[in-house]
Amino acid sequence: MGTTVNALDTVWVLLAAMLVFFMQPGFALVEAGFTRSKNTANILMKNFVDFMFGTVLFWFVGFGIMFGTDVLGGFMGMPNLFAISFDGNFPSNIPIEAFLIFQTVFCATSATIVSGAMAERTKFYMYMIYSVLISVCVYPVSGHWTWGGGWLSELGFHDFAGSTVVHLVGGCLAFVGAWVLGPRLGKYTKDKKSRAIPGHNLTVAALGVFILWMGWFGFNPGSQLGADGMENSSAISHVFLTTNIAAAVGGIAAMFISWIKFSKPSLSLTLNGILAGLVGVTAGCDMVSPAGAAVIGLICGTLMVFAVEFIDQKLHIDDPVGASSVHGVCGFTGTLLTGLLSTSEGWLYTGDAHFFLVELLGASVVAVWAALAGLVIFKGLDKIHGLRVEPRIEDEGLDIYEHGETAYN
């Protein structure tokens, strides 16, 4: 491999990894801003835990499960157990160390999505356990199917930067976790009507979304895994453009839909609309045109508003930050729209439904895998020692009781 390593490609992938890492504080600020001040230190601590434990455990075993040679009939790769030189599906143009750190920051993103949906009522040590299980088992297995040379990739399933692999997995886990955990105290009346529990700081949440928007320019273009040569430079430029357009249109769509529905343009829904557009375009940002990216942003930004309302008011599942809608619903939708709008293989361009059906199959199978894995993990942990803090702790805030300090003194 050493003779083919490209210095420019390596620098680009490492720079992209830094941008994706910077999404961690983005998620932390969004989750903290959308929840109450008495739980802020708890939210911030969880986001550090995601990356600290995720780094070690993905290096230890997850990297091999995701990219190692097939075992168990292609269900997963061969675990590497701390080794970084082993047989597997790796790019030849960058050092394996660069590929490992780039994939590590992706893994941490998937685990972080879950924390927001289960915020304000989860025991900290239980959070640590399920975060570890996601980083070691759930994310790497479905990642192997798609990016590790597994059976979905062999069918032609395409997920360029993770609408399914990262966001749909995180969104499904978030949905199941919030369902198993139950709603926050006071969220629903006795007749099941939803009560709004406002976040304590939309300024912080807005800053978090700006950071995530910037970080996505590493998340999506970085997945090209190269910058040298006309083909790579054109590709990352195209992905930059489609990513930005989808984010902008997603935010515009959510703003106007919320304005129509609630007579006011909602900042919180606009912020989630931007994220919905980003999540949706992540699967096909390399394959769709700028107009296609705008369509993806429009559909995902609109759909997110209705999904948040449906999950909250009809299913009575309390997701404080809307992670299930933004990452789950829009991750699935964006993957399907790739099957429709890809300029090279999309149903609307070629008249052939094969690629769309492969995208539908891949997203559906990964969603079922994440939901079932989440059900086993969350139900199991809840039965063993309870996922949820006591009502008195939830009422007074997790910061003091779980960490012995508060974010605001």
Image (spheres, helix red, strand yellow):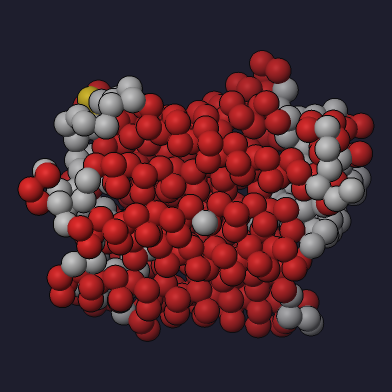
Please tell me which residue is depicted at 34% across the width and 55% down the height of the picture: 14
Residue 219 in the image, given as x and y percentages of width and height: 41, 59
Question: Is residue 142 at all visible to an observer of this figure?
Answer: yes
Please tell me which residue is depicted at 66% across the width and 27% down the height of the picture: 126
Residue 8 in the image, given as x and y percentages of width and height: 22, 62
Q: Quadrant of residue 241?
A: bottom left
Front-most of 171 and 12? 12
Front-most of 232 and 248? 232
Front-most of 358 and 138? 138
Q: Relative to residue 185, is residue 4 depicted above or below?
A: below
Question: Is residue 346 at all visible to an observer of this figure?
Answer: no
Please tell me which residue is depicted at 12% across the width and 44% down the height of the picture: 2
Please tell me which residue is depicted at 57% across the width and 45% down the height of the picture: 112
Residue 98 in the image, given as x and y percentages of width and height: 30, 47
Residue lying at the far left of the rendered structure: 3
Q: Is residue 236 left or right of residue 130?
A: left
